Amino acid sequence: MEEPDKGTGWRHNVTTQGALMQNPITGSGFFSVFGTTRRNRDWLTGLFSDRLGITPTVIAHSNGEACFYYTNHGEIQETDESIYLKVGFLRSPDGTSLVIDKDNEQKFNPHDFENGSISGNGHLIRFHKLEPRFTIFMTFMATSQVYHMLWEGGLLCSTDLRVLLKITSEIRFNEKAIPLHLIYRTVPGPMTHFEDVFRMYPGQVISWHNCALETRHLPDMHSAAAKPEYDHLDNTVYEEYFQKLSGIMSSYVRAIERSNGRIANQLSGGVDSAVIQLLIEQQSSRNEVSPTFSYAWQADSFTYEVAYARLASELLGTTHTFLDIQNSNYADLLVRTVEALGQPSVHAEHVPGQLALAEYLSADHPELHYVFTGLGADVLHGIGRANPVSSSDKHKNLPGHYALREFYKLLGVPIHQKGLRGLPDALRFIFMPGTYRCLRTPANLLDAVNGVDIPYTSLETVRHFLGDQVLLDSLEYAHRLTDETLTSHTSVERAQHIATIIDGYDAASAAQTLFSASRKVLIPFYFDQEVIRLVKSVSPEFRYVHNNEVKPILKSILRMKSLDKIVHKKKGASGFHKELQYWMMNGLLREMVRSIERPGFIDQKDFRRLIENRYPFGYDLVWPLLVYDIFRKHAARQYCARSTL
């Protein structure tokens, strides 16, 4: 790669040509696999050697059970009583890196964990040497994943879903996940796209003891006090908030520097990643500015993002590299993104860019081990999905207002896409008998929060294809999951918590998984447990919008640091939805769309209209259908030899 231009801090753009790597299913990335079984040591080591090419450490016990573990990342610590596997960045209550010894070992049980014995972003696995027992502690909203399933008389766990699937001998698709995938483009909560395979989720501690799995749900995970600490915003609060963020960042930078690691930042140009860059430079003891990177799609609607990253880099004085992703590589990147995730959790069109960037850094920058990202700040510090929802706006809950709102959304599709040429399609839709169903909407769907809870299409579109009961069940699942995880004081906060749990958390987790597949550590800083607590210490009346400005805290921090231009530069979309629609209907993804196998819950006529983009309100469903089709075909190809797919 060429040297920086003098005086600019810029490197010439690089492209994905020649930089794309073909990662095998397992073996190339970071992963841990562990658990317990009643099978003997020889059977266990033979299975792992045959299917994964690894040899696990086995702890045999007198009752016939054996605990086992293998990891190619993280940190192993051992005491007289236990063996610990740490993954991610974990801290003690005093803010220092977590050290496990005989003096503090008693703190690591579910009860003390609930009282805050660990914070950070990661998880800790404790194996007891004298009995077949282990416990997994996960910090609140840790973006590193742990999947688990009952297996061979015990429990099988892995940080990489593909590893778990590779080991097991029978796998079935989870049909209950399909409605959630169509609504949210992911499966939130402990559920996965495979039957009997679950993932740990914020607020859970799981233990294997006495040949049984115990799951403890820790209410609200001590994420905030009953009353917010900050009930107003001013310069004093902004400075104090920044210093607290800086103290949290210090623990990351110190830990990375102790391991001789190098830091980079994924600088998209928004206020979120700009604040992270400020924090890194304030804490770094090296006499250098951490390099920044971002990816650039060949799409007109993505040019805002490129211009924004360029401005932020110039103001922050970083050496920034754009990875120019060729459109011709998109289909391949999309398929391999689904493969790397092991599930169709590709919520937006730009997600494959995370895989491309991770592979580029792995190939061309092996010296950069840790990459920070601002993912999650939108839903934590600002309005991530929609305008604030107010419970006082009672007219929003009236059937007539609901109908008009949905009509506007649905009719806006052909008008927005085709201008006046779309008017005939809009008029035809008006007179479809099924349209008037929104005047007979069940009361449970009239909750104003539900308008925010359907992020990618209209509520009426989902009702058309799934029906009322399936939709109500899916919404109830998401609401219950949110209420179990985070305490909401207002309807605005509840709507944002739904967005945090479903959009923000899963997006950050997916990105971290893609980087792990390329042996890079992605750090979603805003999902650190202490950052979550800090965010929730600000009253929701001021946290998201203040003086008609979204994300007031982060923007005010940048102003205090004389970076007003970053705040005032108009920020466009981070995706390229318009181009994606063209690719699916007329361009490079057209053949993939035409090859989608029709799901049973969509009739032939509706399906044909969707695929041909002739359905006035359904085009947003083509994307999750395409991603799910890739997933089904990939999973069948990879695991059908010994599964019941």
Image: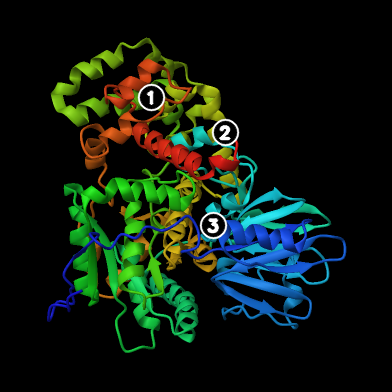
> In the structure shown, which secondary structural element does the residue marked by tag 2 occupy?
loop
From the image, tell me which residue sits under label 1.
401
> In the structure shown, which secondary structural element does the residue marked by tag 1 occupy?
helix
Labels 2 and 1: the sequence-earlier one: 2
From the image, tell me which residue sits under label 3.
160
Labels 3 and 2: the sequence-earlier one: 3
| Amino acid type, callout 3 | Asp
Mark-to-mark CA distance, 2 and 1 = 32 Å
Q: Nearer the viewer, residue 8 or 146?
A: 146
Q: Nearer the viewer, residue 228 or 486?
A: 486
Q: Position of residue 132 (x, y in %)?
A: 80, 63
Does any portion of residue 117 appear in the rendered image?
yes
> In the structure shown, which secondary structural element does the residue marked by tag 3 occupy?
loop
228 above or below 85?
A: above
| Amino acid type, callout 2 | Lys
Q: Nearer the viewer, residue 128 or 629?
A: 629
Closest to the camera, between mark 3 and mark 2, is 3
From the image, tell me which residue sits under label 2.
176
Which image quarter: residue 607?
top left
| Circles 3, 2 touching at the beta carbon (< 8 Å) | no
Does any portion of residue 226 appear in the rendered image?
no
| Amino acid type, callout 1 | His
